[in-house]
Image: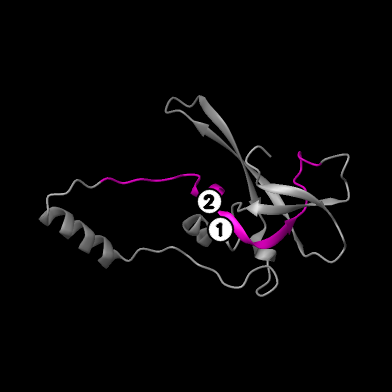
């Protein structure tokens, strides 16, 4: 809600609505004690239909030859190489398509029971997620 991932809009009966579910995970320290608990809302993207919920998919894949070439250039010019992993990159991508989702469990607005979520940002498992995180 604070990330403005969706807005609640009245359900008109014509929208194609996807489901979502919560994934819970417990992270442990090396000694076995609990470090933290994580929760992730994911879309049930397998229910999305081509040309109805999305037009095309995109999967960011780097070829091994490209990595070797970049590393060879870096060695030749004595460049410093650093690696960066953005663990929540998918959560920053803005959607260009109109996607509707049922209100997620635990976030159902009791004053707007006949409303659905209109997604403005991607959530995990949407077919549009990889493209949106790169183009945003």
Per the image, the residue denoted by label 1 is 129
- In the image shown, does 126 or 132 lie closer to the viewer? 132
- Of labels 2 and 1, earlier in sequence is 2
Residue situated furthest bottom in the rendering: 51
Position above or below: 108 against 61: above
Q: What is the crowding at mark 2: few (fewer than 14 residues within 10 Å), some, or many (at least 20)?
A: many
Per the image, the residue denoted by label 2 is 90
**Residue at position x 82%, y 40% in the image:** 109
**Extent of the magenta region:** 82-108
Q: Is residue 4 left or right of residue 56?
A: right
Measuring from the top left, give residue 51's x and y in whole percent: 67, 75
Q: Is residue 6 left or right of residue 15?
A: left
Measuring from the top left, give residue 67's x and y in whole percent: 26, 60
Position above or below: 80 against 94: above
* Label drawn at residue 45: none
Determine the secondary structure under disc 1. helix
Determine the secondary structure under disc 2. helix
Q: What is the crowding at mark 1: few (fewer than 14 residues within 10 Å), some, or many (at least 20)?
A: many
Verify CB contact (< 8 Å) between mark 2 and mark 1: yes
Position above or below: 18 against 117: below
**Residue at position x 60%, y 53% in the image:** 122
- In the image shown, does 40 or 86 lie closer to the viewer? 86
Mark 2 to mark 1: distance in Å? Answer: 6 Å
**Residue at position x 55%, y 69% in the image:** 57
Measuring from the top left, give residue 70's x and y in whole percent: 22, 59
């Amino acid at each position: 809600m604070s990330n403005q991932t969706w807005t609640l809009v009245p359900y008109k009966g014509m929208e194609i609505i996807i489901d979502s579910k919560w994934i819970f995970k417990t992270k442990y320290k090396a000694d076995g004690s609990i470090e933290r608990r994580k929760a992730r809302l994911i879309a049930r993207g397998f229910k999305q239909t081509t040309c109805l919920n999305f037009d095309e998919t995109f999967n960011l894949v780097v070829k091994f030859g490209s990595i070797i070439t970049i590393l060879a250039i870096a060695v030749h010019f004595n460049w410093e190489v650093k690696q960066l992993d953005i663990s929540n990159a998918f959560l920053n991508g803005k959607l260009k398509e109109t996607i509707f989702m049922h209100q997620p469990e635990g976030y159902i607005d009791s004053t707007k029971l006949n409303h659905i979520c209109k997604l403005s940002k991607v959530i995990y498992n949407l077919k549009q997620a990889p493209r949106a995180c790169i183009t945003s």
